[in-house]
Image (cartoon, rainbow, N blue to C red):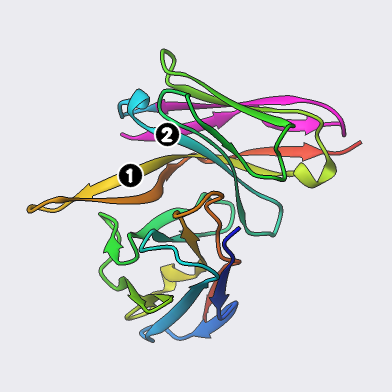
Amino acid sequence: DIQLTQSPSFLSASVGDRVTITCRPSQDTASFLAWYQQKPGKAPKLLIYAASTLESGVPSRFSGSESGAEFTLTISSLQPEDSATYFCQQLNVYPFTFGPGTKVEIK
Amino acid sequence: EVQLVESGGGLVQPGGSLRLSCAATGFPFSAYALHWVRQAPGKGLEHISGITNNGDFTFYADSVKDRFTISRDNSKSTVYLQLGSLRTEDTATYYCTRLNTQYCTAARCFASFWFDPWGQGTPVIVSS
């Protein structure tokens, strides 16, 4: 299985801060990588697919990028409603594994 | 509105069985592969099973292989997950989700894969 390493596992930031989460796969995933946001008791919500394509309706402060073997989710200006856990997922090889998650807390 | 609604979860004893259902509305069901993802309490997401649009190919994670069976009824726009030989470690919320396979710009279409939408989840508790 492809392992996804996410970092950090937890971060605490202030409203308006720029936040970056990284995801590093153990093998090539092409650009078949997605990012999801999950709030407690809720299903995951798609934010980004194809590494950098913003899902319709998702605020433009969210962006995804790819550099070499590393993928990045950036929140350009953190908002209170962004408090959640964020997961990356590779969809290149079965099983479509997820990263362990990054919990984002608002200071 | 594109929607997936799971049902069938509940409390079951170890070794028992359960059938989960996922009813879809708002999109051409027979055109899409459907998948199941589970999440144990306080844990991460685990992709456990999937089925192609016409049911000719199925996927199972090693953790559920030979115990779970995925199927679909395109006439009812419903996908099922039959859970068998249940273990305490199968305790989780089970989500169904649709696999998307391409997106298009004004110029062209691109192949890619992502899960969206997701159902609200149905909880399965395996306990004696």
Q: Is residue A53 left or right of residue A27?
A: left
Residue nearest the viewer, comparing A7 with A44: A7
Looking at the rendered structure, the kind of residue marked 1 is Thr
Q: Quadrant of residue B44?
A: bottom right
The chain to which mark 1 is attached is B
According to the picture, the residue beneath numbered tag 2 turns out to be B33
Residue A74 - label: none
Q: Amino acid at mark 2?
A: Ala
Density class for disc 2 (Cα within 10 Å; few <14, some 14-19, many ≥20) is many
Compute the Cα span from label 1 to label 2: 9 Å
Determine contact: label 1, label 2, CB under 8 Å: yes
Q: Is residue B96 above or below residue A46?
A: above
Q: Which residues are magenta?
A: B1-24
Secondary structure at badge 1 equals strand
Of labels 1 and 2, earlier in sequence is 2
Chain letter of disc 2? B
Residue plotted at (27% across, 62% down): A53
Q: Residues within 10 Å of mark 1 (few under 14, many from 20)?
A: few
Residue at x 42% of width, y 20% of height: B77
Q: Is residue A10 left or right of residue B54?
A: right
Q: Main secondary structure of the magenta part?
A: strand
Q: Which residue is mark 1?
A: B101
Find the residue positioned furthest to the left. Answer: B107
Q: Is residue A61 above or below residue A17?
A: above
Percent coordinates x, y for residue A86 in the rendering: 50, 66
